[in-house]
Image (cartoon, rainbow, N blue to C red):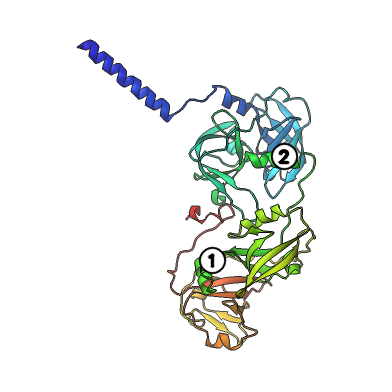
Amino acid sequence: MRQIFNILKLSCLLMVFAFSAAAHPPLDKPTSLKQAIAATFLVQTNDLEQRLLGSGFLFGATRIVMTNDHVVGAERTVRLVASDGRTAIAKVISRDRLRDIAILQVMSDTFDTVRPIQVAKTAPELGQVIFAIGAPYGADFSLSRGIVSALGRQIEANVPVRMIQHDAAVNPGSSGGPLVDAKGQLIGMNSQIADGFRSFIGIAYAIPAGNLVRVRDAMHTTTQPPMQTLGLRVRPVSPRIGAALEMGPASGILVDHVMAGGIAEAAGVQAGDIMVSLGNQPLTVPGDLAFALEHVAIQDVVDLKVLRGKRIKTLSVQVSQKPDLKAAPEARLPLETLDYSMSDIGLQLSSDGRILSVTQNSLAHFEGLSAGDQIIAINSQDLAKNGALLADFRIQQPALVLVALSDGSTRHFVLDPWRKPGRLRPVSGANVLDEEIVIF
């Protein structure tokens, strides 16, 4: 009887061990992460101060080290420190400021015996266990563990990169460090944390390894030329904007402002246009524009289709020209509003739509409208062509107004009397395109 009990007890223990092993799978090789750490460096200033700038890692042949552009900043040379204490000087040979990637060339044979980090052979999967290596807050060669939280996050509208979101702890000093799998193979390069906070809150972003390889191969010997910009500011066509314009199911991006001297102005783009496609690349969210521009970068002239009023117009955009942008200061973000008519929401207007005053703590005030601004269109109807529109206008459904701001730019505001007030939401460059992960 005791023998049977011992056998059952042993079986239970084996089942517990098996479950534990399944929940926490062992690394393929005990030394794999050690090898990744050996190929990771602290990046310091090349002076007597030796101030920590961030992290970097050996990536490919010919003594190439990858890091973030924001890590090296204005430095032309940096000091690299390995986990075994060896140091070497590296020269910044190429930078891609838009994608936040910099390439360094080690100037000696100090690290020639170090094995570069290899790219993972399979793409990362949702829920995959990953490891971040770097120097958070100067804590040398720290390793943190997490999982892939999401794939394909485009966190800045003008950057054609879809990032890996993960929850391995990273902090200032981790930037430029590698994100690796359990084999120590490269998944990406840690670049940002969510919402611009200085401390990790569970959301981090890494530039995928595939992007690093493409950029490295393209800019190995020279700085990547800046990506072309059209010289405009856009926003999504939300259901409220679509309803105001009677568009039905919304598709496209709304032009808020066209900058003087830009490519868009030369092509005839106007504030209020709905951009539908660029060079046969559909535009459904603001971030699509960056990928479309990247796709047509080697072309000279491409077609831009816009919805103006109720008609589709095709404009010729000369993407090869050099714009001479006369940038206006960035206007503040609009806030939510609530009321019934122009006068009731706190606006005193002249006959041509200029805002004479805004009542303090009124809904127009909370919306962000200011004295000196001028309403120039309501629901795409130009006030200059319809002077009686403003005098008789009352908000009976969400209305879209185009306003000329005092700084010279134009911007759309949605006036919605039925939306509950007080839902002011902080928005940052780290997650402005991912509204579901905005930090409240």
Label 2 secondary element: helix
The kind of residue tagged 1 is: Ala
Q: Position of residue 129 (x, y in %)?
A: 50, 34
In this view, the residue in front, 243 or 37, is 243
Quadrant in which the N terminus appears: top left
Q: Is residue 262 above or below residue 429?
A: below
* Local crowd size for mark 1, using a 10 Å CA cut-off: few (<14), some (14–19), many (≥20): some
Task: Name the foreground residue: 68 vs 130.
Answer: 130
Q: 237 and 406: which one is in front?
A: 237
Position of 26 with respect to 91 (left or right) is left
Q: Which residue is mark 2?
A: 216
* Residue 33 locus on image (x, y percent): 57, 27
The kind of residue tagged 2 is Arg
Q: How many marks?
A: 2
Residue 304 found in image quarter: bottom right
Q: Secondary structure at mark 1?
A: loop
Query: On the picture, is 233 further left or further right than 242?
Result: right
Whether residues under marks 1 and 2 lie with C-beta atoms below 8 angstroms apart, the answer is: no
| Circle nearer the viewer, 1 or 2 | 1
For mark 2, does the 10 Å Cα neighbourhood hold few (<14), some (14 to 19), or many (20 or more) residues? many
Q: Is residue 1 left or right of residue 410?
A: left
Residue 51 is at least partly visible in this image: no
Q: Position of residue 419 (x, y in %)?
A: 44, 70
Question: Which is more toward the observer, 426 or 417?
Answer: 417
| Residue located 56% across and 77% down the image | 379
Residue bearing the label numbered 1: 250
Numbered circle sitting on residue 138: none
Task: Please tell me in which quadrant of the rendered image residue 183 appears.
Answer: top right
Image: 257 above or below 163: below
